[in-house]
Image (cartoon, rainbow, N blue to C red):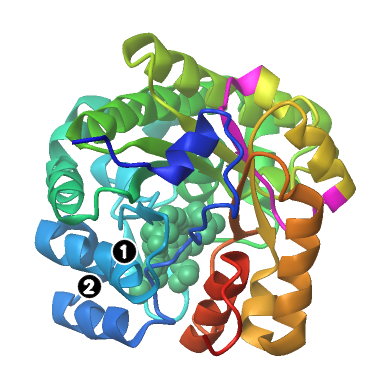
Amino acid sequence: MPSPRRKVLEVLQGSTVTPPPIWLMRQAGRYLPEYRETRKQAGSFLQLCYSPDLATEVTLQPIRRYGFDAAILFSDILVIPDGLDRNVHFIEGSGPRMEPIDEEGIFSLSPEKVLPHLKPVMQAVEQIRARLPDETTLLGFCGAPWTVATYMIAGHGTSDQAPARLFGYRHPKAFAHLLAVLADLSADYLVAQIDAGADAVQIFDSWAGVLGETEFEEYAIKPVARIIRSVKERRPQAKIIAFAKGAGMNLRHYRQKTGADMIGLDWSVPLSFAADLQKDGPVQGNLDPMRVVAGGLALDDGIDAILQVLGQGPLVFNLGHGITPEANPDHVTQLVNRVRGIAHGA
Ligand code: CP3
C-alpha cells in the first residue's frame, strides 16, 4: 500500500501544498457541544487530560466534524507543573491556579517524577494514532519553558506576566535553573509523544510577546533551542513547530536561532513580514480568532488575504491563537470550505 499523504507533515518538510492544509489551535474545546458533553462526564479538566479514553474522544471530535488535516493531542501545557507537584487546578471561568513557586522551591523540584505521571498522555497518543484516518497528521505539544514558568511563578494567569519578569530580574540564577529544568523535561516529554505516535510537535510560547529584546533571547530563544536540539539529537527525523505569540520583530531570526522547522504566526504579524519569513521556510497561521466569531465577510476577507499573500508557498493554515468558546461551529465549516476552495453551500 502506498503510504498516506500527511499534508501538514509535507509542509513541515518544506513542500508547498495547494490548497494549504488546515488545523486550528484549540480545535477541541468549548465551542463544540460534543466537547462540553464529554467535559461534563470527565468531572475536572485535569481528569479529562489524564483519561486516555476521554482525551482520545475529544481529540477526534473536531476531526470527525471538519476533517482537519491535523489532530492535536488533547492535553494542557500545565500537566508538566502538575507532574512537578505544584498543585495545579482549573477554576471554572477563571483559569488555572497552582502554588506559586519561590527560589527554594525551584532548587528542590523533582523532575524524575514527571514522565511516569504523564503515562496516560502517551497512552492517549497511541490510541489517537490508532483511530485517526491515515492521512491525518497527529501533533503532540508542550508549553515553552518561559510560558510555563509564568504560571508557576504567579500561580495563575496574568495579563502582562509582571511577576515572572520581576522574578527573572531579582533571581536570575533560580530563574535560569527553572527554565533549564522545564526545557529538559519538555524535551523528554516530546520524545515520548513522538515515540507514542505523534508525527510532529508544537511548542507553545503564548507569552513571548511581553519580553524585551534581551529577555526574549534568554527566556524564549535559548530554552526553546535547547528543547529542539535535544529532541533532534535523539529523534533526527522529528519535525517541530514553534509558536511565539506576540514576538513581532523578534521572529526575524527565531527559526534559525531555535532550529524550528516551521514557525507559528499570530494575527498581529503583518502578511508582508510573514511572506519574508516564509522565504526561509514554512509558516503557520495567522487568522484573527475574532474573525471566526464574527463569521460572514469578516471571515472570508481574512482568509482570502492570507491565501493571497502566503498561499503560493509552504503554509499550514491556522488561527493566530486558539479558537475561543464563543466561536460558532458553522463559521468553522465556512472557514474550512473556503480554505479548501469549496463553494459556499456546496
Ligand atoms: O489545541 C487543542 O485543541 C489541544 C488542547 C490544548 C488545551 N490547552 C486545552 C484546554 C492546548 C494545545 C492547550 C495549550 C495551552 N494551555 C496554552 C498555550 C496555548 C494558548 O492558548 O495560549 C496555555 C497558555 C494553556 C494554559 C491554560 N489552559 C489556560 C490559561 C486555560 C484557561 C483558559 C481557558 O481557555 O479556559 C486552560 C484550560 C484549557 N486548556 C481548556 C482547554 C480546552 C478549557 C478548560 C475547560 O474545558 O474547562
Identify the main secondary structure in magenta: loop
Q: Is residue 109 among the parts visible in the rendering?
A: no
Which is nearer the eye, 198 or 220?
198
Residue drawn where x is 48% and y is 21% of the image: 228
Q: Identify the image quadrant of the N terminus.
A: top left
Identify the image quadrant of residue 200.
Answer: top left
Q: Percent position (x, y) of residue 154?
A: 53, 52
**From the viewer's perspective, is residue 226 above or below residue 265?**
above
Asked if disc 2 and disc 1 are in contact, CB closer than 8 Å, the reply is yes
The residue pinned by badge 2 equals 44
Q: Percent position (x, y) of residue 289?
A: 64, 71
Which label's residue is closer to the chain start, 2 or 1?
2
Q: State the separation of the CA atoms marked 2 and 1.
A: 9 Å
Which disc is residue 89 wearing? 1
User: In the picture provided, is 181 more to the left or to the right than 217?
Assistant: left
Residue stretch in magenta: 257-271
